[in-house]
Image (cartoon, rainbow, N blue to C red):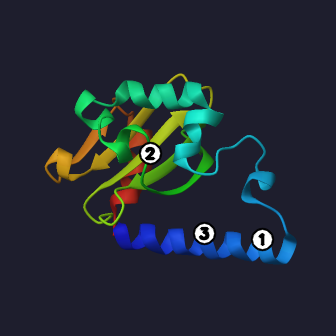
Amino acid sequence: MALRFLRNALGVSLLVAGSFLCAGISAQAASPGLPVYPWDLRKKMPVHYQAYLKILPTRLKRTAWFGRFDGTGMPVERVAVDGKAYFTGGICKPHDCADNYLTFLITADGSRAVAMVKATETGGQIVELGNPMTAERQFMAKEFQD
């Protein structure tokens, strides 16, 4: 998982850098209104961010990379899961991605969020947050496969 996350992050960085050099456009310009990274949700999509915070246990809210998305993240994407529109993304603890990773799905309207996390705070176990449905669970579980 961590290797795939880092490989994807490097690939995205190279792709974005190449876009800046070749076309002079930003990633934001390609997706107006869509946050580029999870930490952008706080300001650009506060309803969605609040839905995410609702599923976090208090002990995780106090951890910067969980509660504020202050970590290493993958770009937020719009996806369809079981015919429903979601925003998805992932974030990990800086300098410790292999053992501390979270992936999330937030409904496009911001009414509901679910997540899966494996972290020191969860005893190294994969824990579901927000009671994901089967299709949501299957989608997020792919992020934990090596």
Classify 65 as above or below 18. above
Q: Which residue, given by chain and number where applicable, does mark 2 sit on? A: 69
**Disc 3: which residue:** 12
**Above or below 81: residue 113:** above
**Secondary element type, mark 3:** helix
Q: Residue furthest left?
A: 123
Estimate the x, y position of residue 26 in percent, counting from the top left. Answer: 77, 60
Observer-side mark, 2 or 3, equals: 2
The kind of residue on which mark 3 rests is Val
Q: Residue at x 39, y 33 (%)?
A: 133
In the image, farthest residue toward the right: 23
Task: First in sequence, mark 2 or 1: give its number.
Answer: 1
Label 1 with label 3: CB-CB less than 8 Å? no
Q: Secondary structure at mark 1?
A: helix
**Residue 100 pos. (x, y %):** 28, 56
Image marks 2 and 3: residues in contact by CB distance under 8 Å: no
Q: CA distance from mark 2 to mark 1?
A: 25 Å
Disc 2 packing (10 Å; few <14; some 14–19; many ≥20): many
> How many C-alpha atoms fall within 10 Å of the one at disc 1: few (<14), some, or many (≥20)?
few
Which is more N-terminal, label 3 or label 2? 3
Q: Is residue 2 left or right of residue 79?
A: left
The residue located at (60%, 69%) in the rendering is 12
For mark 3, does the 10 Å Cα neighbourhood hold few (<14), some (14 to 19), or many (20 or more) residues? some
Q: Amino acid at mark 2?
A: Phe
Instruction: Please name the amino acid that badge 1 sits on.
Output: Phe
x, y percent for residue 28:
74, 52
List the residue tagged with mark 1.
20
Quarter of the image for residue 71 reads bottom left
Q: CA distance from mark 1 to mark 3?
A: 12 Å
Query: What residue is shown at x 33% (from left), y 31% (from top)?
Result: 56
In this rendering, the label closer to the viewer, 1 or 3: 1
